């Protein structure tokens, strides 16, 4: 964990908004390629135990353990269609969101099907993004009424925030929700981060724009573009970090001291030197 913290602190954010000035550029990161998993994958993710979840064009989910051995396969591809998002922040409870069918499938750690939450039954027809909550419920952002909502596994709404249209001067509809460090982070690349506490009070706003693959770890806000990795810690100077490992990357995920990079020909797994 110390290696990860040192790595995250050395990463940086290079943004050009006047409120986020004094950017610093640091040296190029050095990575060692550990494994290339050949294949055509549409997306993937990795959990905090080092497990990797690969999704192919047929919407099959394959789980690999730390040794990259296959330990699970979810192959129920006819019921809901295309996977819009997958959340593995709790490795014992995998959330798979099907936006077109307004459904969230819940899987166990072996990718065995457990249950489905039908969002239509709660009149949630425009859920843009979802995430696991700290208390094992599910965060949702409902575009219909511009509210963050929390749902339990039975499909009941147990909490909702104030309408975002009453909070902000400009429209805000996040494409990412992240529950981390005791706060809820909502992100849209054209607006930046909006940070709430668990009671729904707006705590911070950070105009970190045009990021991909956003992540929050130990108070650090992390993202990237096609050339640089950006990390910003509130109240500290901004910096930027470049790495050849991100060339032609479709998606990048960090877990522990590893960097997982998806390209057209498969998944590349790197370790920080």
Image (cartoon, rainbow, N blue to C red):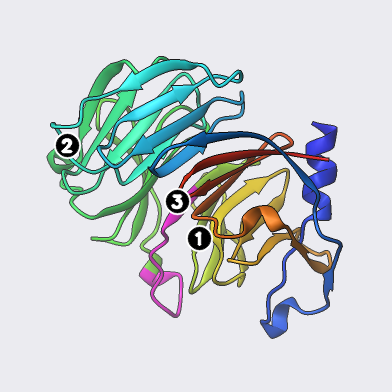
Answer yes or no: is residue 233 visible: yes
Give residue 84's position: percent from left, percent from top: 31, 46
- What secondary structure is found at the residue carrying circle 1? strand
Give the foreground label among 3 and 1.
Answer: 3
Neighbourhood count class around disc 1 (C-alpha, 10 Å): few under 14, some 14–19, many 20 upward = many
Q: Earlier in the sequence, mark 3 or mark 1?
A: 1
In this view of the protein, which residue sits in the foreground, 159 or 40? 40
Prevailing secondary structure of the magenta residues? loop
> Which of the numbered marks, if any, corresponds to residue 187?
1
Residue nearest the viewer, comparing 39 with 157:
39
Extent of the magenta region: 165-177
Query: Which residue is labeled 3 in the image?
Result: 264
User: In the image, is 162 to the left or to the right of 64?
Assistant: left
The local secondary structure at tag 2 comes to: loop
Q: Mark 3 or mark 2, which is nearer the start of the sequence?
A: 2
Q: Which residue is mark 2?
A: 80
């Amino acid at each position: 964990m110390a290696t990860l913290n040192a790595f995250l602190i050395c990463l940086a954010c290079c943004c050009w908004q006047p409120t986020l000035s004094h950017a610093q550029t640091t040296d190029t990161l050095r990575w060692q390629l550990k494994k290339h998993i050949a294949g055509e994958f549409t997306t993937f993710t990795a959990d905090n135990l080092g497990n990797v979840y690969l999704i192919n064009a047929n919407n099959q989910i394959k789980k690999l353990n730390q040794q990259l051995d296959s330990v699970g396969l979810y192959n129920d591809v006819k019921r809901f269609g295309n996977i819009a998002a997958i959340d593995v922040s709790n490795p014992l409870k995998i959330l798979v969101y099907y936006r077109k069918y307004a459904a969230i499938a819940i899987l166990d750690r072996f990718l065995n099907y457990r249950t489905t939450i039908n969002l239509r039954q709660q009149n949630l027809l425009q859920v843009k993004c979802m995430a696991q909550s700290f208390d094992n419920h599910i965060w949702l952002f409902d575009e219909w009424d511009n509210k963050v909502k929390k749902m339990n596994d039975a499909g009941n709404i147990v909490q909702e925030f104030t309408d975002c249209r009453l909070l902000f001067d400009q429209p805000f509809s996040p494409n990412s929700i992240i529950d981390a460090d005791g706060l809820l982070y909502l992100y849209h690349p054209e607006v930046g981060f909006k940070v709430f506490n668990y009671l729904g009070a707006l705590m911070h706003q950070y105009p970190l724009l045009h990021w991909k693959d956003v992540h929050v770890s130990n108070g650090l806000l992390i993202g990237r573009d096609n050339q640089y990795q950006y990390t910003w810690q509130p109240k500290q100077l901004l910096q930027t970090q470049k790495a050849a490992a991100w060339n032609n990357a479709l998606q990048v995920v960090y877990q522990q001291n590893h960097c997982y990079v998806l390209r057209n020909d498969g998944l590349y797994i790197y370790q920080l030197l």
